Amino acid sequence: MTELLTMTDEAKSQLRSVLERQNKPEGALRVYISPGGCSGFSYGMSLEDEIDPDDAVVEVDGVKVVVDEFSAQYLKGSLIDYEDSLMGGGFQVRNPNAVKSCACGQSFDAAQGGGQAKPCS
């Protein structure tokens, strides 16, 4: 069975740092999907103090990521990465379910039938 999501070492380290700076050592990163964007869906992230009972919780090396039920169906198997870049740096979602992408990975389509997301140029 495919895990809901995983994180790179850099993403885990950066999340720990963010939670410490925000004085939320027990907090979590919420990753969610919302309808909209140029490809049909958009990714969103926020820090959470409280976890909803219906949320899926992924704990990796002491850091937590929470995902609501709607978003989980589109994020299954995804990798959360952290990219340090002058343009577009920050947490990134590497989603194997995305068949079309735009806005440098912030918007995607998960239409059935396969395909792969195209990288930003």
Image (tube, grey):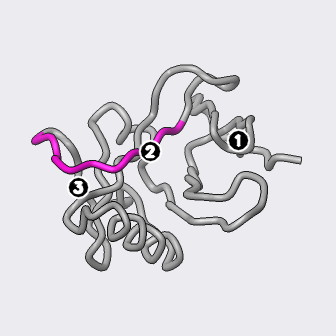
Tell me the amino acid under the disc marked 1: Gly
Q: Position of residue 33 (x, y in %)?
A: 45, 34
In front of the other: 48 or 4? 48
The CA span between labels 3 and 1 is: 28 Å
The disc label shown at residue 57, or none: 3
Q: Position of residue 8 (x, y in %)?
A: 51, 73
Residue at the (63%, 34%) spot, across then down: 108
Q: Is residue 19 left or right of residue 24?
A: right
Local crowd size for mark 2, using a 10 Å CA cut-off: few (<14), some (14–19), many (≥20): some
Tell me the amino acid under the disc marked 3: Val
Q: Earlier in the sequence, mark 3 or mark 2?
A: 2
Q: Position of residue 7 (x, y in %)?
A: 45, 68
- Find disc 2 in the rendering and name its residue: 45
Element under label 3? strand
The CA span between labels 1 and 2 is: 25 Å
In front of the other: 18 or 3? 18
Figure quadrant of residue 81: bottom right
Determine the residue located farthest toward the right in the rendered image: 121
